[in-house]
Amino acid sequence: MSQEIKISNGYFQLWKAFLKQNNSDWNNFNLVAEKRELLESILVQPIDQQSSYDFFMEMIDATRQHLDCPDLIFSMAKCIHPAHFGLLGYMASRSENMAQALEYVIRFSRLVIDGAYITQMQYQHDGETVRMFCPLSDDKFIFLHEITLASMLHLGKQFIPQDQFPLLRMSFVNAPQMALKYYQDFYQCQLKFEQPVYEIIFSTDVLLLKPEQADPNLIQILVKQAEDALLQRSHLTNIAQQLQFIVAEYLKLEQQAPKIEDIAQELHVSVRTLQRQLSQLNTSFKVILEDERMKRCEYLLTQSLGLTDIALDLGYSDQSALARAYKAYSGQTLLQKKQQLK
């Protein structure tokens, strides 16, 4: 199962807002041209579109090299605005009460974070407490869990007076990522680390609290938009999955790379429509084709085939072209990978 997940472009906008508040500019970071172009593209896209979490973490790592900010997670979270969570943020701020807002957070969380490798947050109402929790599927997502939890709670405090916010306990799967005093100052509640799941515990008083900007009429419109967005995302994800399967089968059976025209015909859409749909998922036919070529390449390296034969089977002009492509994909040479697979 792929560990690649997509996050709302709002995370990138939140990061940009943090940089601005700290009188910093990502243009001063030493980004290669390809990364710079990708970032520029993401920052002009709608917030509700999604981009690569791995790329987001590259920007976070660059920020840590550029700025001395030991409490980066909390400093970013304090810049949060409903717009950074897109539709979901506006729904939470306009809900009739916090019970409804929590329901929407659970129901529409895929609009913010989406990927098969992520387990969505769950909700329990147990006697005197309300519990929201989710596991950690991989250590690479620790930052994502922490920034999301911190941002959610800081956003909630914008809707509800600080003295009425009934947060009782925060639990983290990971060990503290910074000095404990930063956690204590930010959450101001009981803290537990290295627990089985991430967990937010409220008193049941939270369910009756009413956001100051509650708007029952607007919320109906926002819910309909969110439902449509989820439906569209499911459709597009299915298109991408079909494309991956078709390309993989084509490489295996035809022993050459397919053309986008062939794929579009098999999916019964025009080339332009297919390109537009893939663009909405922040990918392209070229990206998917290269990914499937590399997966097939790694399988063929386990077989008794020469590198030239593998290159031709995958539609490359020669062994050198394949070698360059694989090095760019994995950081390894073909011979290194072949030895590793043995």
Image (spheres, helix red, strand yellow):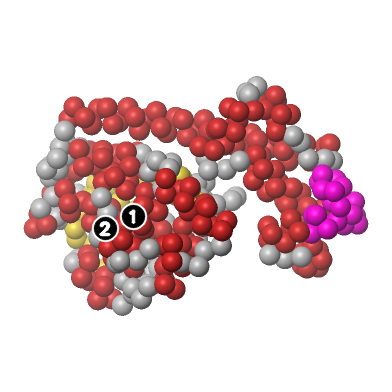
Q: Position of residue 114 (x, y in %)?
A: 46, 45
Residue 242: image x %, image y %? Answer: 64, 34
Name the image quarter holding residue 214: top left
Residue type at tag 1: Leu
Assess disc 1: are there few (<14), some (14-19) or many (≥20) residues with their C-alpha within 10 Å of its C-alpha.
Answer: many
Q: Which residues are magenta?
A: 305-323
Q: How many marks?
A: 2
In which quadrant is the C terminus drawn?
A: bottom right
Q: Position of residue 333 (x, y in %)?
A: 76, 65
Question: Badge 2 local density, few (<14 within 10 Å), some, or many (20+)?
Answer: many
Q: For marks 1 and 2, give the CA distance.
A: 7 Å
Residue at 20% of width from left, 37% of height from top?
Answer: 95
Give the residue pinned by disc 1: 14
- Decide if residue 200 is in sight here: no
Cβ–Cβ below 8 Å for labels 1 and 2? Answer: yes
Q: Is residue 292 visible?
A: yes
Q: Secondary structure at mark 1?
A: helix
Is residue 175 shown left or right of residue 314?
A: left
